[in-house]
Amino acid sequence: MAEGHLTVQKYLVGAMTRAGLSGRIHIVDAFIKRSRPPAIDAIFVGALAGLQKDIIDYVIGVADRDGLDKCLLMSAARIWSCRTLEEVRFLADAIQSLADAGAESFQQALQVSCGDAVIEHWNGDIFVEKSKILQRLLVLGTNYMTPDFFGRILLMICVTFLYKLFKYKEKVRQGSLGLTKLHCKSGKNLCCATIVQDMFKVLSVVCKHGAADVISSRLLDIADRSLEDIGRLLHISNVSIEASSAEWPLKAIKFLLIDCGIKDLSVTVTALAAFQAARLNVLLSVVQCFLKLQCFEAVYVYLNLSITFCRMDAIQYLLSVIHQSSDTRSLIHVVRQAASDTGGPPLGPQGVLCALHSNFLMNKDFTMNEAVTLAKLPETDPSVKTALRTEWSQEAFEAGKQAGERHFFSVMLVRKHAKSPLRVGELPLDLQVAIGYLPLYKDCSNTPGSLLSLRQRGELLAALRQLYQGSRNPTYSESAFLNADKQTLLSRLAARLPAWVSGGDLRRCNSY
């Protein structure tokens, strides 16, 4: 039923968009009377695409304040995707009409334009005209633009272009066996220098139309300058942009935070940039830059974003930094907030599980107890609860042990009764163990962090009990294994595996 309802909704939205695109006022009117808020949004998008001025005017005339604000956001999102001067000028007129009618969401519109709507290829031939719309947004929203907001936007622009550079580099690597050149819509070759130039063009627009006035005149030092001049200003030693492309946005962040004083505006001025970095999967590079510049006040915000967006590398890095002066209460709050269903982890429970595997409370018992508590809290997201119950509960531990016992009996049956020409029972003992337990070893050793889940621990203990059964060495007793750490348990299993199988994984485990 739910899927059918969603299908109908998508069909209706598509029909509303086409109505706006067509310019048929009687159809538009019928849709608005039937389903006002979603109809206004969809019809306005269609009218923008179809350059239907009559429909734009009609929608603006019937929309309430919330509807006008949403239309302003959708207009801002189209700035960089305009393909012709006609589209640019039509969009500029629509934004002016929305402002005249009372739209006020200029902060969000600027955020959308400078972040979410920055597309991969520009069409640089009409960039100047497009930038005039951005300028217009800044002028129309002057009363809503604070120094702190400008600081957030400038940092977010740098993060957006850092992502663009990483994405471009990845495409070049993927295309190394074929076409290696990417092209702009205008036909010019796309390269790192183009992306860096675009970044400073957008920064220049924001700096010259408000940010420099309310933050620092030093912002004008990166406005309308050549890349050579900006490179010297930012102390970028490598003259080859292609070789040092990521250094440009990161050095720009440093210039904005330190030289222009953005760091002193508020303790959370970096939060929007961190959110953008988490969303675009460049969080580790960005938070490393922030913390190097002593932006420690928002470190728990960074950790929350890392867990929420399941950025494993950033989680482990931040925990290693936070543990130097850890605040247990704040750590618990961050993990519970990221695990809650108020927004729900967008990419599932993996971020919360990574924090647990990383022993985020620096005490195995405390971290395990917090896993139990999380599973019981009513506000914990259902997907997180399910994962905790199947991996981190006492029931999961027992299930792991039972699975380990069943697996052992299966291995024994294969050794003794299999009719395969391979004759498993005649292989060297370490190869027999590898056939039976290499998947378990890989699963545990590839899990990030220093803690095994209770399900993994139960299965691993069952395996070791069988493999070391009858051993006269007291260090190999079941009681000795019961409270052993991850490294010890895996090293005991590795001792029964061929050296060529376990060496690299064990070294990686030792690094946690």
Image (tube, rainbow, N blue to C red):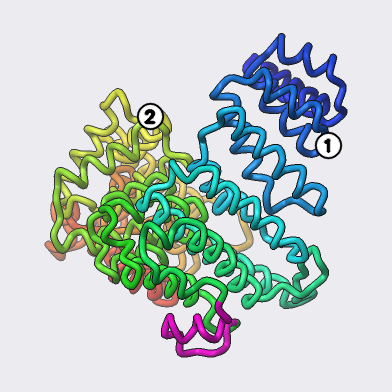
Q: Is residue 383 visible?
A: yes
Where does the magenta region start and end? 225-241
Q: Is residue 460 visible?
A: no
Occupied quadrant, residue 295: bottom left
Task: Check residue 50 in the rendering and tell me which mark sits there, or answer none.
Answer: 1
The kind of residue on which mark 2 rests is: Thr
Query: In which quadrant is the N terminus drawn?
Result: top right
The kind of residue on which mark 1 rests is: Gly
Query: In which quadrant is the C terminus drawn?
Result: bottom left
Occupied quadrant, residue 503: bottom left
Which element type, helix, strand or loop, lies under badge 2? Answer: loop
Which element type, helix, strand or loop, lies under badge 1? Answer: helix
Question: What residue is drawn where x is 61% and y is 32%?
Answer: 100
* Residue 218 horizontal side relative to residue 457, left or right: right
Q: Position of residue 469 (x, y in %)?
A: 25, 55
Question: Which is nearer the eye, 323 or 484?
Answer: 323
Compared to 115, does 374 lie above or below? Answer: above
Q: Position of residue 296 (x, y in %)?
A: 23, 60
Mark 2 or mark 1: which comes first in sequence? 1
Compared to 141, does 7 lie above or below? Answer: above
Q: Badge 2 is on which residue?
A: 342
Mark 2, residues whose alpha carbon is within 10 Å: few (<14), some, or many (≥20)? few
Tell which tag, 2 or 1, sits nearer the viewer: 1
Question: What residue is drawn where x is 44% and y is 58%?
Answer: 211
* Residue 25 horizontal side relative to residue 361, left or right: right
